[in-house]
Image (cartoon, rainbow, N blue to C red):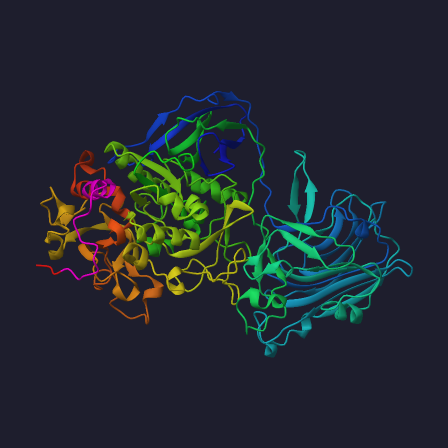
Amino acid sequence: MAINGYTDKMSVQPGQNVKFMVNSENGKYRTEIVRLIHGDTDPEGPGLKVEKVNAKVNKDYDGKKQEIYMGSYIKFDNPPALQSLESFSLQAMIMSTTPDLGEQALLSKWDPKENKGYGLFIDKEGCISLWIGDKNGNVENISTGKPLMYGVWFFVGASFDAESGKATVFQEARVTKTNGKFSLAYGIEEHNASIEKEINIEPNADNGAPFTIASLIDKQDDGKFKAIKRFNGKIDRPRVASTALTKEKMETWIENPSGASIAAAWDFSKGISKKGFDDIRRVFDTSPNQIHGETVNMPTRAVTGYNWTSEEHKFVHAPEQYGAIHFHDDDLTDAGWDVDFEWTIPEDLPSGVYAAHVVSGDDEDYITFFVRPKKGKPTAKAVLILPTASYLAYANNRFQDVPLAQVMFGRAPVVQQDDMYLGEHAEYGLSTYDFHNDGTGVCFSSSLRPILNMRPKYRHTLSPSLWQFNADLHLVDWLTEKGFKFDVVTDQDVHFEGADLLNQYNVALTGSHPEYYSGPMMDAIEDFQASGGRFMYMGSNGFYWIVTFDPNNPSIMEVRKNFGNNAWKAWPGEVHLSLTGEFGTIWKHRGRAPQKIGGTGYVAQGFEISSYFRRTEDSHHPSVSWIFEGIEDEKIGDFGLVGGGAAGLELDIYDNELGTPPHAVIIASSEDHSSVYMPVAEELYFNVPGMAGDENPRVRADMVYYPTPNGGAVFSTSSISYCGSLSHNNYDNNISKLTENVLKKFISDEPLPMSTKREKVEFI
């Protein structure tokens, strides 16, 4: 892939500008704006459908290669109090998660090109080391000689006395019953060390380099800064003194830095309010020098510190125990590329899914974005809510690297060129299904980077055909082919504008997999339904994981995983979202099960062949039989582009105990799922034989319909593969007809056939 790119925003409306950042390794490239209709290249389906858009930006460009520099750290520019030091002390509480990964910077004011300055590091052997470099390029490295341990908190520090030339460096394990991997009984004293040495050089503190925590930064030829010697792990209560303190004095400074020699005393818990961090990027110095800083590439906050007692799991209730930041050498929230071109969305451009198709030689990319109507000016009675939160969650995922992938999928994963490219380019960032290099889960995702699996033609390794974005284009294509007028908005738009956005429409449709949802999104959907909005839940595993967006940078999304069908589990005490302070994990565990939103909720998954639905006896009742008008078949959807059927990949089920309204009607249920289909973790009380799809009657999808107040209604397909069946037989099939029957009724201003009273309907 010699060319790729991204936009500065995912959702844009007429009159607004969208900026395009492009990496073209071969130089010149051609751009053409296109509207995306269908992105699945399966020869059994309609194939790729794009419509060219006449735009001023459609022309040739002189491209350039653009680099991505990953890794999180804190930068303090060049504070005077830290560039005039002769004698000094550096200290912090640290927990290393890759102590054997090579040199890693902790606290430093070091010029990596000239080897000048001072700093506290982890050396090549995993030991704490003090580096001092003078103005002549002479360097002294003083190491403790004892490797740190993974997952253990250490009190680390170093001092230098310019008058005597004495340098001291130490590390001391600080294990409690709750603050790390090992117990007090493990006996880790052998990893403690302290060493003194007299040296004949003095640090060149005034070296022009910024003071940094958790990396060094090296200015590149393109003028941007690359993080090097990046640290993996937690840092808590870092301090700098302008004199050589004794270890005993440093001990008192952990909690109570005092005296005239304070140069900096950072408190990473500052900024925590009752609703999370006020600004997650800001770092505050409590010393008189007020050397405040800013994090780069979003290290993880709201993480337990060295003094966590496990009595409080919500960081806003005990901020003093959450004074740590977890840094990763592969964190990335902004590729930081230069803008190649920008386009003002024409006032008459229809709402829809668009892309800048960029081509360089034999290589191409579709830089996707979404055009919504101008705020307050809907252009249709139906709106499609595209699940961009879920696109972000899966952005650039590397399922081919998951050891259990073949067992989960029931086959060998299919790896394509984009997957191989991501395997060779870690700098393109991770999905929330991946692990950082230190083994911890990824809780942030950003759209400010190329997202290679949010493209037409991409075929996902996870599913029999495709997943997420191109699965949603199945629905876009069907709506277009059937002549329905519809607007497109993103769920991020819903997050920020709420029910006011949806209430402009008669009916709202979801994509095939609206898995990741924020509280404001949930509120908006429920309020829309309560006010008479008609809702079509066109997929499965929706309204599942709890997420939020950074109010200061809406391109960034946060999730904390635990207690659900997990790709990873957050560490104890770290399941609350740093951006809001709210409990993370899944909505079911917050009393907001998906059944309350769509009438059905996630029950099982199987990434193999898809099955079909069979009509229920209740579906023949006059109050719901209109849904099947023109359909004689009992089997519904025994065909499709995703696994060969309309019921597959992930399945939802009717469940009164979890909030399915009692008057909801199961109009069809799936059957004949294979043993690859298994209940999801939160559905299990005990793991016992007989739980697979070929034996367990709960492993099924329930297609559901029910009325809501004020003339509204909900229709749920309960299957991710459903939309892949819409185009079968040139759109003339029972899934297409059923969906058309529902959407026509929902779009109309006429009352729906079924009563809105909460009376139980008697069925024949």
Report x, y in % for residue 434.
Answer: 47, 53
Residue beneath the point at 50% across and 57% down = 441
Q: Is residue 716 visible?
A: no
Report x, y in % for residue 467.
Answer: 35, 45
Q: Would residue 413 be found to the left or right of residue 5 on screen?
A: left
Which of these two is toward me, 481 or 26? 481
Q: Is residue 332 visible?
A: yes
Residue 475 magenta: no
In this view, the residue farthest toward the bottom is 185
Report x, y in % for residue 92.
Answer: 70, 63
Which of these two is toward me, 658 or 324? 658
Residue beneath the point at 35% across and 52% down = 527
Q: Which residues are magenta?
A: 739-761
Report x, y in % for residue 310.
Answer: 55, 72
Which of these two is toward me, 506 or 463? 506
Which of these two is toward me, 279 or 610? 279
